[in-house]
Image: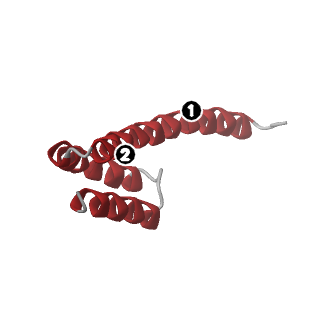
Amino acid sequence: MANTPQAKKRIIRNANRARINGARKSRIRGFIKKVETAVTAGDKQAAADALKVAQPEIARGVAKGVLHKNTAARKMSRLTKRVAAL
């Protein structure tokens, strides 16, 4: 258990950051899901539009430290490839 005031404060801040980061990750997953549903539906225009919106969101996740750079690059690459294959 935390004994010092700094440690107690750090526990509170870590919990707050975890909540914010979890919300960010969930938001990114939602954008990715929109692209995937458009791809499975076979709607190329909707998939391309969803991808255009999802890419900056994924990049923002990297900038905020929620996603690793290579993870984001891999996700964007795979989504782009799936949209182009339509």
Q: Nearer the viewer, residue 82 or 68?
A: 82
The quarter holding residue 49 reads top left
Q: Provide residue 56's location: percent of width, then percent of height.
A: 26, 51
Q: Give the tally of numbered discs.
A: 2
**Residue highlighted by disc 1:** 16
Circle 1: residue type:
Asn
Q: Earlier in the sequence, mark 1 or mark 2?
A: 1
The quarter holding residue 1 reads top right
Q: Provide residue 39's location: percent of width, then percent of height.
A: 29, 48
Q: Provide residue 2's location: percent of width, then percent of height.
A: 80, 37
Q: Provide residue 75's location: percent of width, then percent of height.
A: 40, 59
Q: Is residue 70 above or below residue 1?
A: below
Mark 1 neighbour class, 10 Å CA radius: few under 14, some 14 to 19, many 20 or more: few
Circle 2: residue type:
Ile
What element does badge 2 sit on? helix
Gap in angstroms between the C-alphas marked 1 and 2: 25 Å
User: Residue at the location (25% across, 46% down)?
Assistant: 42
Mark 2 neighbour class, 10 Å CA radius: few under 14, some 14 to 19, many 20 or more: many
Q: Give the residue at the far left of this rendering.
A: 45
What element does badge 1 sit on? helix
User: Residue at the location (62% across, 39% down)?
Assistant: 14
Quarter containing the C terminus: bottom left
User: Residue at the location (50% across, 40% down)?
Assistant: 21
**Which dot marks residue 62?**
none
18 lies left or right of 82? right
8 lies left or right of 29? right
Q: Nearer the viewer, residue 3 or 42?
A: 42
Q: Is residue 70 above or below residue 20?
A: below
User: Residue at the location (37% across, 65% down)?
Assistant: 73
CB atoms of marks 1 and 2 within 8 Å: no
Q: Nearer the viewer, mark 1 or mark 2?
A: 2
**Residue highlighted by disc 2:** 32
